Amino acid sequence: MSKRKPISDVRWRVPIGYLGDECRQFRATGCLVVLGLLAVVNVARESFGDSPTPADVGGDLAKPSTFWPDLDADKKVVEAARLQAGELSRRAGEEVVALRKAAYHLASANAVLSHELEPAASNGLLTLYSEIEASTVADVQDALSRADQSIELGLAALVSIQNGEAVVSEEIRTEVERLEEAGRSLKVFANAMRTYLDSGAVDTDQVRDRASELSFFRENADPKVAGAARLWQSALRSRESDSQPVLWNLEYVFSAPAVASLPYSFHGRILRCRIVASRGAESSALALLHQLEEQCDEWFADPELRAAARRTCAFLRLEILQSWRDRLAEGNADERTWCGEQMELLSKDYFQGSRRTLYRLSPAVPIFVPPPQENSPQPTANPG
């Protein structure tokens, strides 16, 4: 099968197939959406025209790294989550009832994966063209080791209930099964995060194994679990050399996500735009991001979350424009100037003053085991 040909102006590298793939899913409005997206791209092309080559925008542009990551905010999130996880582990150590001990251990692991590792997960998904810092990798590995230990301790406590001599009630048996399933789920997501956030050389076999482990969760009745599985599976596969399968796996940008699946479905659409850009279709990615930003008004009822989501789209546009501009040869002064001008506009419109919050992947994985309540069930012996 022949590869799709881009629009005649190769300089803009706009493979119409990327936009067409999106619009085929929405026949009633597909033509209008295609025209709208192409209009966005054409504005960029026509802004060059045949005018004399303008002076290149200077090198003092505010780069995306100026705005993200927010290291102070990240530190607060990590410290608060670490304290919560540590307190849950402490309670687990003091608890004498095996079922509650297991719940505390698993809740501690969940807090690490969902909250303590959220900044690393958000930064890994939103930072398009930079490597994860070595110090961050060390913190991630430490957090994952603690999560692993808590999961194993929690599962061991559940085994002790099953191996006990006392006959437990049906209620307790059901709760043991629920916690066992939650523990196994946390283990799968922890392995996926470990592989994705590893800054070392990509082990393709390991990536595919971890991605395959998530397939089961894609069919989960809980849209949060299903959405998280799709996102992490796609993120893992995006580390491979061929990113085309990831585009098949991700939801289309134009499709409305289930509200309950946010933030995973939103970040999945951000990942889709990233991959389109990484495959050389920067113009298509910018157009899709523009459309995604417009849809945030319908998807987010909360004004602060809506603003953060729109700013996230703008941030990725900044990253794409910076990378595109940096790769253009000096002879492409008009293109470089346009990229620089767009970066300046985005910086002024979205990142003035304290308005820098992006839409984070919070929680990084769903909450399978919340902290136990004081009145949770306890194993009791039934009459023989």
Image: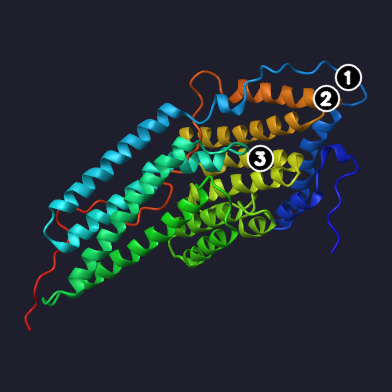
Q: Residue at x 38, y 58 (%)?
A: 186
Q: CA distance from mark 1 to mark 2?
A: 12 Å
In the picture provided, is 90 more to the left or to the right than 348?
left
Query: Which three-letter amino acid code belongs to the residue tagged 2?
Result: Glu
Question: Which element is circle 3 on?
Answer: helix
Q: Assign a secondary structure to mark 1.
A: loop
Q: Is residue 121 left or right of 326 when viewed as pictured?
A: left
Quarter of the figure with the N terminus: bottom right
Front position in the image: 247 or 237: 237
Question: Disc 2 or 3, which lies upstream in sequence?
Answer: 3
Mark 3 or 1, which is nearer the eye? 1
Q: Is residue 165 visible?
A: yes
Q: Residue at x 53, y 53 (%)?
A: 231
Seen at 38% across and 49% down, the residue is 144
**Circle count:** 3
SS category of the residue bearing label 2: loop
Q: Is residue 171 visible?
A: no
* Picture layout, residue 115 above or below residue 103: above
- Residue 269, position as x, y percentages in the image: 60, 48
Are discs 2 and 3 less than 8 Å apart at CB?
A: no
State the residue position of label 3.
289
According to the picture, the residue beneath numbered tag 1 turns out to be: 53
N-terminal of the pair, mark 3 or mark 1, is 1
In the image, 18: left or right of 245?
right
Badge 3 amino acid:
Leu
Image marks 3 and 1: residues in contact by CB distance under 8 Å: no
Tell me which numbered mark, 1 or 2, is placed earlier along the sequence.
1
Q: Quadrant of residue 244?
A: bottom right
Can you identify the residue that label 2 sits on?
330
Crowd class of label 3 (few under 14; some 14 to 19; many from 20; radius 10 Å): many
Query: Of the residues tagged 2 and 3, which is closer to the observer?
Result: 2
The image position of residue 135, as x and y in percent, is 44, 35
